[in-house]
Image (cartoon, rainbow, N blue to C red):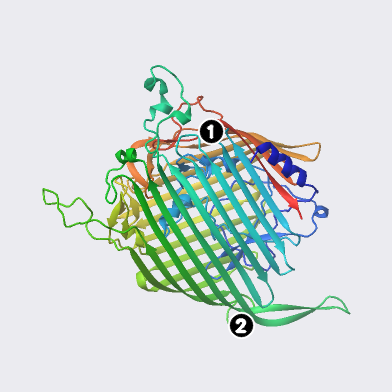
C-alpha cells in the first residue's frame, strides 16, 4: 500500500465535524476497579467534544470473566501520544523484545506480567494477539468505523500496519461489530520479518430480560527468527570488526539464524448469555405519563469459551545447526508442531445488589467445566541405544503425542459496585477434578472515594492469591531441539497492593508486594525449572504529570526489586518521560509537539529462545542503561488524527549499546508516519 495514496484516500473520506467522545458505560452497569496504571496515552486534561457536535452519546465496555460483568471503557479517538504506539520498544516502559514491530517480547515490569498460559507459545505475542482482556463492545447509536494506517522505513525495512474497527447498532439494545488487523514489517535487521493477520466479529444485546455478549477472533502470526546478531561489536564498535570502517548497514549485519520462523495461529469463540428475573417498576413522569422499567433481581448466566491454538517452528537452513546445543529428531531441519484446544462452560447464578432481599450486595455462585487437548510432535527417539559410556544422550521418559484433561472448578463472587463512598469485589474458585484438584484462586479489590481539592480522590486496595498446578506443556514437551518430562508441583503466590489516584494534582501511585513459591521459569539451558523456595518482589510506580499552559510534562517512574535475581531478574528502575507543547492552529488543528525518553537500568537480562518462543534467565550479559528518545508531532483535524515521528532520534549521541535483549538491538533511527480516521457512516 502506497503511504501517500492511503493518506489522501483516508482524508478525502473523513468528512464531517463530530468525534466519538470517550464516555463511560451507562450508570447502571457495574464498574470494575483497575489494579494497573493508566496507559499513558491520555493527558491529565483530555480533549472534550461540544455536546452539539455529538448526535448521541456513545459508550464502550469490556467484559469480565467468569460471569460477564461489564467494565466501562473508552472509544479510542485521542491524538495524544498516538505515535508512540508504533515503536516496538515502547509497548511498556521497560520492554524486552527481539526488535521488530509485532515480534516476540516480554514486559520487564513484574506487576504488568500475566501468568503463564496453558499454550505458552502465545505469551511472547501477548501484546499483538486479540484476547478477551482487550475486547471492546460499543453502543454508538450511529455506525462507527475507526480505520488507521501507519508506515515506517523504506523499501528494505518497511513497517506497515492497517487496523480497522466497525460497530453498528441494530436498535437501542443490539449491536454488531468487526475487527481487522494486518501487520507487515520487514525489520531493520536481517531475517526478522513479521506478518500478522488478525480478524474477528462481535455482537451484543442488552435487553430487559436477556443479555448477550460474544465474539469470534482469529489470529495468524508469522515471525522470522534470526537468533540475534552474531557479534555485538557490529553495534557497539563496528570499526573493530571492519578494519577501521566506522559504520555498517543494519541489514548487512550477520545473524545466527537464516532459515527459521515461528507461526502461531488460533481462534477464540466467546459467548456470554444472561437471563434476568425481576419485576416491572412504574414511575410517573408527569400527570399523564408513566414510565415502566424492568428491575432485574436475579441473573442466570451461561458462558461458553472455546479456544484453539497451533504453533509451528521450522528451520530449513542446514547451516543453522551450529546454533543449537541439542538436536534430537531431525539432523538437518526442524518442523515442530504443537496443537491445543480447550472448551469451557460456566453456569452461574447472581443475586443483584440492592434489589434482592437476601443480599444488599451482589452475590454469585458458579461452576466451570473445561476440556483441554494437546497434540505434539511425535517422539521417535530410540532411547534403548546407549552411548559407549552407557549413558543415554536423550531426556528420560517418552513424551506422549496427545493428551486430554478434564477439569472442574466451583466458585463465588461478591460485589458492591453501586455507591459513591465504598465499592468492592472479590472472586474465588476452587478446583475439584483433574489437574485442577486443590487449585485455589482468589482476587479481591476495595475502593473508596472522598473529596479533596475540589475533586474526587480514590484509594484502592487489591489482593490476589494463587495456588495452581503447572501447565501441562511445562511438564511434558517434545521438539527437535528441546524435550522435557517434568513433575512440577503447584505454584503459590500472594500479591497485596494499593493505588492512590489524585486527579487534581495529576498523581497516580501504585505500590505492591508479591511473594511467590515454587515459581516455574526457564533457566540458562532454556529448559523449564521450578524454584525450590520463595521469591519476593516489591514494586512502586509513580505517574506524575505537570501542566504549565501549553507545556505538558508526563512522567512515569517504577522502582522494583527481586529478592532472587537468578529466578526473577528485573531492572530496578524504569522511567518514561514525555515533554510536549499542546496547542491549536487556527482553532481547528490540535497539535502535540514534543520529545520523549524511555530508560531502564542495567540488569542481567532475560534472553530469548526462538525454538520455543520463551524467555530464559542468563547471568552473563547486562542489558539496559540506554535512553531511547523519539521526536514526534501528533495532530488531529476534525475526524483525522495523524503523526510524524523520528524514532530513536538520539542514536549515536548517547553511546551505542542499544540492545533490548542480548544480541537483539533495537531499531536504528528512522522516520515514521501514520493516521487514523473516524469515518462518518
Q: Secondary structure at mark 2?
A: loop
Q: Is residue 470 visible?
A: no
Label 1 neighbourhood size at 10 Å, few (<14), some (14-19), many (20+)? Answer: few
Say whether residue 5 is left or right of residue 469.
right
The 10 Å Cα crowd at callout 2, few under 14, some 14 to 19, many 20 or more, is few
Quadrant, the C terminus: bottom right
Residues at marks 2 and 1, CA–CA distance in whole angstroms = 68 Å
Q: Earlier in the sequence, mark 2 or mark 1?
A: 1
Taking 77 as reference, is 486 above or below it? below
- Whether residue 287 sits left or right of residue 439 in the image: it is right
Say which residue appears at 49% left-offset and 68% top-offset.
Answer: 427
Name which quarter of the figure residue 524 lies in: top left
Q: Nearer the viewer, mark 2 or mark 1?
A: 1
Q: Quadrant of the N terminus?
A: top right
The residue at which mark 1 appears reads as 156
Residue 132, image x, y percentages: 54, 61
Residue situated in front as seen by the camera: 656 or 332: 332
The residue drawn where x is 45% and y is 51% is 263
Instruction: Please name whichever residue, 20 or 670, is drawn nearer the observer in this view of the structure.
Output: 670
Q: Measured from the top left, where is residue 193 in percent x and y?
A: 49, 41
Using the image as rendered, state which of residue 533 and residue 378 is in the foreground.
378
Instruction: Say which residue label 2 marks.
Output: 357
Horizontal side of 148 relative to 447 (left or right) equals: right
* Residue 243, quarter of the rendered image: top left
- Please report the residue visible at 28 percent of the width from the left and 58 percent of the height from the top: 379
What residue is at 72 percent from the left and 44 percent from the top? Answer: 10
> Quick one: SS at disc 1?
loop
Amino acid at each position: 500500500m502506497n503511504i501517500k495514496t492511503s493518506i489522501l484516500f483516508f482524508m478525502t473520506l473523513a468528512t464531517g465535524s463530530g468525534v466519538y467522545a470517550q464516555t463511560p458505560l451507562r450508570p447502571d452497569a457495574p464498574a470494575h476497579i483497575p489494579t494497573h496504571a493508566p496507559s499513558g496515552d491520555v493527558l491529565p486534561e483530555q480533549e472534550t467534544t461540544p455536546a452539539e457536535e455529538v448526535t448521541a452519546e456513545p459508550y464502550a465496555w469490556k467484559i469480565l470473566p467468569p460471569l460477564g460483568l461489564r467494565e466501562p471503557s473508552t472509544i479510542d479517538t485521542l491524538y495524544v501520544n498516538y505515535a508512540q504506539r508504533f515503536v516496538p520498544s515502547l509497548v511498556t516502559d521497560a520492554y524486552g523484545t527481539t526488535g521488530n514491530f509485532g515480534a516476540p517480547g516480554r514486559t520487564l515490569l513484574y506487576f504488568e506480567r500475566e501468568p503463564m498460559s496453558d499454550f505458552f507459545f502465545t505469551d511472547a505475542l501477548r501484546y499483538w494477539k486479540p484476547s478477551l482482556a482487550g475486547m471492546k463492545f460499543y453502543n454508538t447509536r450511529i455506525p462507527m468505523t475507526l480505520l488507521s494506517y501507519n508506515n515506517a522505513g523504506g523499501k528494505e525495512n518497511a513497517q506497515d500496519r492497517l487496523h480497522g474497527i466497525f460497530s453498528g447498532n441494530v436498535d437501542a439494545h443490539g449491536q454488531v461489530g468487526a475487527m481487522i488487523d494486518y501487520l507487515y514489517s520487514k525489520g531493520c535487521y536481517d531475517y526478522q520479518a513479521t506478518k500478522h493477520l488478525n480478524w474477528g466479529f462481535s455482537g451484543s444485546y442488552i435487553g430487559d430480560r436477556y443479555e448477550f455478549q460474544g465474539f469470534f477472533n482469529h489470529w495468524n502470526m508469522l515471525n522470522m527468527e534470526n537468533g540475534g546478531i552474531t557479534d555485538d561489536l557490529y553495534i557497539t564498535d563496528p570499526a573493530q570488526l571492519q578494519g577501521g570502517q566506522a559504520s555498517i548497514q543494519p541489514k548487512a549485519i550477520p545473524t545466527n539464524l537464516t532459515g527459521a520462523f515461528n507461526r502461531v495461529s488460533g481462534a477464540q469463540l466467546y459467548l456470554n448469555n444472561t437471563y434476568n428475573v425481576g419485576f416491572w417498576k412504574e414511575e410517573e413522569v408527569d400527570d399523564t405519563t408513566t414510565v415502566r422499567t424492568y428491575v432485574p433481581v436475579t441473573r442466570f448466566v451461561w458462558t461458553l469459551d472455546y479456544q484453539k491454538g497451533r504453533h509451528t517452528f521450522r528451520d530449513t537452513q542446514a547451516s543453522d545447526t551450529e546454533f543449537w546445543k541439542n538436536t534430537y529428531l531431525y539432523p538437518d531441519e526442524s518442523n515442530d508442531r504443537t496443537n491445543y484446544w480447550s472448551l469451557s462452560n460456566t453456569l452461574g447464578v447472581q443475586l443483584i445488589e440492592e434489589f434482592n432481599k437476601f443480599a444488599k450486595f451482589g452475590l454469585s455462585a458458579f461452576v466451570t467445566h473445561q476440556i483441554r487437548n494437546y497434540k505434539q510432535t511425535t517422539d521417535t527417539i530410540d532411547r534403548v541405544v546407549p552411548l559407549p559410556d552407557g549413558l543415554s544422550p536423550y531426556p528420560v521418559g517418552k513424551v506422549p503425542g496427545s493428551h486430554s484433561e478434564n477439569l472442574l472448578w466451583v466458585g463465588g463472587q461478591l460485589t458492591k459496585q453501586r455507591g459513591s463512598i465504598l465499592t468492592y469485589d472479590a472472586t474465588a474458585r476452587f478446583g475439584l477434578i483433574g489437574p485442577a484438584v486443590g487449585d485455589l484462586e482468589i482476587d479481591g479489590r476495595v475502593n473508596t472515594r472522598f473529596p479533596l481539592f475540589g475533586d474526587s480522590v480514590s484509594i484502592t486496595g487489591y489482593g490476589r492469591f494463587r495456588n495452581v498446578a503447572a501447565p501441562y506443556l511445562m511438564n511434558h514437551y517434545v521438539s527437535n531441539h528441546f524435550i522435557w518430562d517434568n513433575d512440577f508441583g503447584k505454584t503459590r503466590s500472594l500479591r497485596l497492593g494499593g493505588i492512590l489516584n489524585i486527579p487534581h494534582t495529576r498523581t497516580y501511585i501504585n505500590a505492591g508486594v508479591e511473594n511467590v513459591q515454587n515459581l516455574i521459569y526457564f533457566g540458562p539451558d532454556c529448559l523449564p525449572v521450578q524454584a525450590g523456595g520463595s521469591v519476593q518482589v516489591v514494586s512502586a510506580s509513580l505517574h506524575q504529570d505537570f501542566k504549565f499552559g501549553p507545556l505538558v510534562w508526563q512522567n512515569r517512574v517504577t522502582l522494583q526489586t527481586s529478592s532472587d535475581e537468578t529466578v526473577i531478574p528485573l531492572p530496578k528502575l524504569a522511567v518514561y518521560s514525555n515533554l510536549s507543547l499542546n496547542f491549536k492552529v487556527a482553532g481547528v488543528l490540535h497539535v502535540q509537539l514534543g520529545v520523549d525518553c524511555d530508560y531502564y537500568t542495567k540488569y542481567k537480562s532475560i534472553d530469548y529462545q526462538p525454538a520455543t518462543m520463551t524467555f530464559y534467565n542468563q547471568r552473563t550479559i547486562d542489558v539496559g542503561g540506554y535512553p531511547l528518545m523519539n521526536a514526534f508531532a501528533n495532530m488531529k483535524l476534525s475526524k483525522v488524527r495523524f503523526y510524524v515521528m523520528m524514532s530513536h532520534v538520539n542514536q549515536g549521541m548517547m553511546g551505542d549499546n542499544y540492545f533490548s535483549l542480548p544480541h537483539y538491538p533495537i531499531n536504528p533511527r528512522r522516520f515514521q508516519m501514520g493516521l487514523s480516521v473516524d469515518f462518518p457512516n
